Amino acid sequence: MPQDAPATTTETFDLTPPTDVQLHELVSDLSDEERHVLLEHGTEAPFCGVFLNEKRPGVFTCRLCGLPLFHGGTKFESGTGWPSFTTPYATDHLKYIRDNSYGMVRTEIVCSRCGSHQGHVFPDGPPPTGERYCINSVSLAFTPLGEPLPNKLGRGAPEGEPAT
Ligand SMILES: [Zn+2]
């Protein structure tokens, strides 16, 4: 017997990369440190990121293009000095790249839409995923629950709609 379907949140974000013009505009908006981390695969110093102690429910988005990358509720206290999450907002919102720099084998994660560097993922996180997404604060922006998500590329809903 069919029932009234609950309001679903199967929102689809437009993952088409920004145009060169859009990218240029977005980049010109960044600080030097943001540029270094997002575009040159830098790492911010531990224990000074602005989102280290951000515990409100909401959505963390890519600092550069505004794509949702993590839910506030999946953040946990890792003790590493960087914001850490157990699971991405959506698996196709992140791209995983093998990183052999500094004599280590790590998995770098970048925003799948604009390619900006976010951090690394390690296999030593807590349940349920066992993954630890270790992210630079400067790579992120935060939208508290119920406030409008960024709509930096003018793509429209669900961007610009209240964060859920
Ligand atoms: Zn992005």
Image (spheres, rainbow, N blue to C red):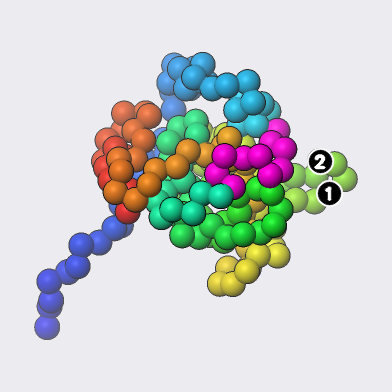
Q: Position of residue 139 (x, y in %)?
A: 57, 37
Which residue appears at 56% of the width and 72% of the height?
128
Q: Nearer the viewer, residue 105 or 65?
A: 65
Secondary structure character of the magenta stretch overall: loop
Q: Position of residue 64 (x, y in %)?
A: 49, 31
- The quadrant of the picture occupied by the N terminus is bottom left
SS label for mark 2: helix
Which residue appears at 40% of the width and 51% of the height?
58
Amino acid type, residue under disc 1 in the picture: Met
Q: CA distance from mark 1 to mark 2?
A: 6 Å
Q: Position of residue 162 (x, y in %)?
A: 28, 45
Which residue appears at 54% of the width and 57% of the height?
75
Which residue appears at 72% of the width and 38% of the height?
45
Q: Nearer the viewer, residue 86 or 137?
A: 137
Q: Is residue 89 visible from the viewing direction of this image? A: no
Q: Would you say 19 lies left or right of 140 here?
A: left
- Tell me, for residue 96, which label it has, or none: none
Amino acid type, residue under disc 2 in the picture: Ser
- Which residue in the structure is indicated by mark 2? 101
Disc 1 crowd, CA 10 A, few/some/many (<14, 14-19, 20+): few
Decide whether residue 44 is among the magenta residues: yes
Q: Would you say 161 lies left or right of 109 here?
A: left
In the displayed structure, 156 sits above or below 162; it is above
- Which residue in the structure is indicated by mark 1? 104
Decide whether residue 54 is among the magenta residues: no
Instruction: Give the quadrant of residue 32.
Output: top right
Disc 2 crowd, CA 10 A, few/some/many (<14, 14-19, 20+): few
**CB under 8 Å between discs 1 and 2:** yes
In the displayed structure, 48 sits above or below 39; it is below
Q: Would you say 115 lies left or right of 19 here?
A: right
SS label for mark 1: loop
Which stretch did the figure color magenta? 42-52
